[in-house]
Amino acid sequence: MRDSLQRFWGKFGFALIVLVALCGAPSARAATLQLNQSLCHAVTTAEKGDASLSALAFSCTGTPQGYQQGSLWLRTDLGPSRGTPDGIALMVHHSRFDRLAVAFTFADGAVRWQRVRQGDYGAHWRAGGQILFEAPEHAAPLVAVTMRFDRLAAHELLRARLITKDASRIESTGMAAGVGAALTLLLVSCIYSASLAFAVRRQYLAWQAAWSATMLLWGGIWSQVHLALFPMMAGTVSAQICTFFACLAIAFATASAVTALDRGSVPARLRSATLGLGVIVGLSGIPLALMRSGSLGQWADILGFAVLCDLLAVAICLGWSWRRGSIEARDFTAAWCLPMAMLAFIHLVDVEDGFWGGGSKLLVLVAATWQALWLSAAATRRLANLRIERDSARAAEAQAQELARRDPLTGLPNRRGFIESVTPLLDRARSDNLSAALLLVDIDRFKSINDVYGHEAGDAVLCRIARRIARWEGPMCTVARLGGEEFGLLTVGMEGIVLDRFAESIRREIAACDHGEAVGERLVTASIGVAEVRPACDFQRLYRIADEALYDAKHAGRNRVVLQRHTDAANPPLEVPGRETALSG
């Protein structure tokens, strides 16, 4: 079961990554716009109008300064090789700015503007955290594209690409489908983990559900899917919330992994340090989310280093616990291996302009989906194993209890099992004012059989008689071996002449048993003492009366039935004359 699940999820994860890699690779006709390479810049005050574009002096060297409280203008000139007959589209990753205006400049001097602002992206937003601007149709060729950002937080975080209109539509459709599938799986995992946490009261499952929910919110806001319902959140607000949820998700993931491990399998200091790193990363999301100016790029690098340290600490905890045989550590290691490899990959390779423009964030979303699904499957498998172990333990316990109530030689209930089964019968008989009868059957001179023929022969005689007595087991009669050569039968509602004949038939059946293989021609008989009480009394009282009757049967010559009847359990038993039978002749 475990191996098949691992193979399934392994194939699923590989297929998911291959799908993203093949279908999400950047278009061959896309052009990434980068400062000082394809983009020149200018900085003005925010009050300067868009019409001042023609009068600006752009610089293609150096770094723009002082734009965070003003406007940053970025211009790219299109040569003959950059134009396409299919038309040009500009894809910009949403970031923290108040307003973005895009100017398409044509060879005849015409300029066409398209604008979005914080809280209003109109029809320009696309899934995957991108804003799309398509160059309008015009008779003259397009010669330049200019972007104007008002109060931009950091130019280092900007990502923009020029792409054909057809390719932009294909990318937008593919991104929407991929993001929708990932968010759906995260939602399922969140609900499932929360249900498991509530059902089994496991803390790490609750943290796992919180992590899935946080990643679901982060993925929905980063991809801008939420703008379909809340368009007023477009822009800076969404970017700030994404930063906060990204840090919070790391904290929840750390808590889920560490709390899943047994306390004894990880050193206390390592456990505390790892949880502390997770808390630090989670809390750092609050000031980073509120920042609108300053060195956001540098703070992002510091946060990235802290995240890597946190992941390394989690990996050490998992490895330490795995070496000590923790199953949870093995499952979490398998779940974390892909996200860790993905984070290492995106820190070593710049993929921000790949994968349909989703870049590293799309890879993180895919890795989170893998992790959520794997942990859900691992938790299910673990709980299924625990349920199997619990059911096996219960079955073994039930079997042990049953064996404790059974005589190992004859298979009949022993004294303990007999008392447990007849006690409720006697209680019901007493409440219904019914009679109860206990028949004590004792094999005559059984010790001499063991002495003369051996204990194996004696055991064979007991088993033979036990099989004969077991025939009377039924709704009206309960049988048992009470110890040694003594057997017991209890009936409820049987009295008078019917009880007399029943006891006599038992005596005759036992005497008629063939024990030739064990004792040869020797006749084996039994004495029977019968106690009949109306209404029924407790077992101890009934046993004492039957034992006295059996004593009388033994001293009267054996191989006979002696019955004592009692009509009131509060009075001493009275012997009923004329109720003794013996073997004739």
Image (spheres, helix red, strand yellow):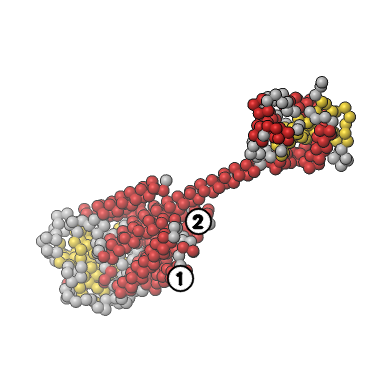
At 15% from the left edge and 66% from the top edge, which residue is drawn?
77
At 23% from the left edge and 76% from the top edge, which residue is drawn?
64
At 31% from the left edge and 51% from the top edge, which residue is drawn?
14
Q: Nearer the viewer, residue 22 or 398?
A: 398
Vertical side of 377 occupied by 319: above or below: below
Is 130 left, or right, of 109 in this rendering? right
State the residue position of label 1: 269
Is 562 left, or right, of 96 in this rendering? right
Residue 229 figure quarter = bottom left
Q: Amino acid at mark 1?
A: Arg
Q: Position of residue 362 (x, y in %)?
A: 31, 59
Q: Amino acid at mark 2?
A: Ala
Q: Residue furthest front?
A: 452
Camera-side mark, 1 or 2: 1
State the residue position of label 2: 197
SS for dot 2: helix
Q: Is residue 433 visible?
A: no
Q: Are marks 1 and 2 in contact (CB under 8 Å)?
A: no
Q: Residue furthest left?
A: 80
Q: Nearer the viewer, residue 184 or 85?
A: 184
Q: Position of residue 44 (x, y in %)?
A: 24, 77
Counting other residues with Cα less than 10 Å from the Cα at mark 2, is it few (<14), some (14-19), or many (20 or more)? Answer: some
Q: Position of residue 11 (x, y in %)?
A: 33, 49
- Mark closest to the chain's N terminus, 1 or 2: 2
Vertical side of 566 occupied by 296: above or below: below
SS for dot 1: helix
